[in-house]
Image (cartoon, rainbow, N blue to C red):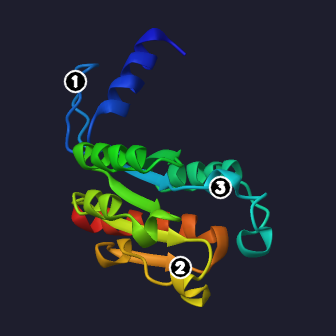
Amino acid sequence: MSRALRQSTALMACATATDYLSFTGTAITTMSDLVYILNGPNLNMLGKREPHLYGHTTLAEIETTVRSVAAQLELRCEFRQTNSEATMIDWLQEAFEAGAGVILNPAGFSFRSIPVLDATKLIERPLIEVHITNIHKRDEIYRHSLISSVATGVICGLGVQCYPLALHAMAGMLKTER
């Protein structure tokens, strides 16, 4: 890859959807929207942890699928996972500052984390909450997600297909915003 192309690509990756780039002297008036796909605690153990509930697909495999679908939909994505509540809050604030849409699998943060809930309230673009399992069929402690109260939409119980489904929904919502 040429130096100019690398610089141009780096500039485009840092720009928001409403920015105009003039690196080559030509204004770019359209570019893909940015979506943060954020994953909460223990999702790094997918494929190993409770496969009777979550299946055998790993988070790395989900990320590969997500990146492929995002590219097809002309979406840029940041795919991340953390076991730390503070890191999740930082990433949600970063997504807000970047003007990004968010697909969030809050996992255990869903049910008791007021700080994560408060951080999701910052998000101005669509926020889609996803859960691999149907949280409404789980034990009582897992049935009420705080995040659902601020999410644009919720997808649960469809296994790892919730991620590409959420990307398609996000692409449609972002398109109608333009």
Quarter of image, res 120: bottom left
Label 2 element class: helix
Viewer-closest of 99 and 16: 99
Does the rendering let one see residue 130?
Answer: yes
The amino acid at mark 2 is: Tyr
Pointer 3 or 1: first along the chain: 1
Please state the horizontal and vertical placement of residue 32, each as a whole percent of the image: 36, 47
Mark 1 Cα-neighbour bin, 10 Å: few <14, some 14–19, many ≥20? few
Please state the horizontal and vertical placement of residue 2, each as a whole percent of the image: 50, 12
Mark 3 Cα-neighbour bin, 10 Å: few <14, some 14–19, many ≥20? some
Q: Name the residue under label 1.
A: 22
Mark 2 Cα-neighbour bin, 10 Å: few <14, some 14–19, many ≥20? some
Q: Name the residue under label 3.
A: 62
The amino acid at mark 1 is: Ser
Please state the horizontal and vertical placement of residue 165, each as a whole percent of the image: 53, 70
Pointer 2 or 1: first along the chain: 1
Residue at 37%, 76% (x, y): give it: 148
Q: Mark 2 points at which residue?
A: 142
Q: Is residue 163 above or below residue 45?
A: below
Q: Nearer the viewer, mark 2 or mark 1?
A: 2
Q: Is residue 174 left or right of residue 105?
A: left
